[in-house]
C-alpha cells in the first residue's frame, strides 16, 4: 500500500463534502499539474491518502482511500488529464495543522513542506504513521 496527500480548498471541496459521497466516493478532479497527475497515475485501489484542507485551515483533517485507478477526468476537455476516485475512511480525532507538521523534526523532508504548492503528493509510511499519531487517528 502507498500513501498520499490530497489538498483541497474547503470552499471548493471540503471533508464534509467528501464524507457526504459515502462509499461511492468521488473523482478527485480538476487537477491540472503534470506532477500531481502522474502521482494519481501511480495510485492503486486500497492506497490511502490524507485529506488536507488548504487556505485558512491548513490541516490534515481525514483519511481517504483510493477506490478507482486513474481514468479520464470528467471535467477536462482534453485527454491529458486523469484522476482517481476516492472515498472518505475516517476523520482525524484532532486536525494536524501545517504549523504542527513544520515543528515535527521527523517530518522535515515531507513533500508538504518541500513542494507546498503541489495538490497531490506522496507520503512515506513513516510520515503517515507520525501524522496519524499526532492526530490521534489509527494509521491502519
Image (cartoon, rainbow, N blue to C red):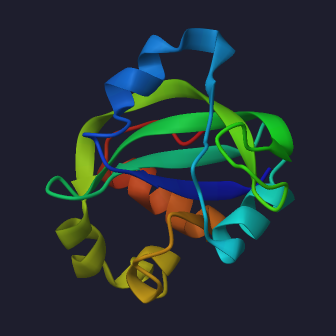
Side of 99 where 126 appears, left or right: right
The reply, left or right, for residue 134 in relation to residue 28 is left
Q: Is residue 6 visible?
A: yes
Quadrant of res 27: top right
Residue 81 horizontal/vertical position (percent): 75, 57
Residue at the image position 44 percent from the left and 13 percent from the top: 20
Q: Which x, y percent locates residue 8?
A: 40, 49
Q: Looking at the image, which residue sits at the far front?
A: 77
Residue 8's place in the image compared with 27, above or below, is below
Image quadrant holding the C terminus, namely top right
In the image, residue 92 lies at what x, y percent? 34, 36
In the image, is residue 67 above or below residue 103?
Answer: above
Query: Quadrant of the rendered structure where residue 3 is?
Result: bottom right
Position of residue 80 in the picture relative to residue 101 (left or right) = right
Decide which of 107, 34 is in the foreground and name it: 34
Q: Residue at x 50, y 73 (%)?
A: 118
Which one is nearer the viewer's eye here, 57 or 127?
A: 57
Q: Quadrant of residue 69?
A: top right
Residue at the far left: name it: 56
Query: Which residue lies at the image location 43% right of the left edge and 74% below the top edge?
Result: 112
Amino acid at each position: 500500500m502507498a500513501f498520499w496527500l490530497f489538498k483541497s480548498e474547503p470552499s471548493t471541496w471540503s471533508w464534509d463534502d467528501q464524507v457526504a459521497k459515502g462509499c461511492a466516493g468521488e473523482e478527485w478532479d480538476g487537477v491540472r499539474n503534470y506532477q500531481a497527475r502522474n502521482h494519481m497515475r501511480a495510485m492503486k485501489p486500497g492506497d490511502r491518502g490524507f485529506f488536507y484542507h488548504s487556505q485558512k485551515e491548513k490541516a490534515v483533517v481525514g483519511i481517504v482511500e483510493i477506490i478507482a485507478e486513474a481514468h479520464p477526468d470528467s471535467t477536462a476537455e482534453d485527454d491529458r488529464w486523469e484522476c482517481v476516485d476516492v472515498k472518505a475512511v475516517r476523520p482525524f480525532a484532532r486536525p494536524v495543522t501545517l504549523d504542527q507538521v513544520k515543528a515535527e523534526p521527523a517530518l522535515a523532508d515531507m513533500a508538504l513542506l518541500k513542494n507546498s504548492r503541489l495538490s497531490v503528493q506522496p507520503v512515506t509510511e513513516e510520515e503517515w504513521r507520525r501524522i496519524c499519531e499526532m492526530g490521534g487517528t489509527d494509521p491502519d
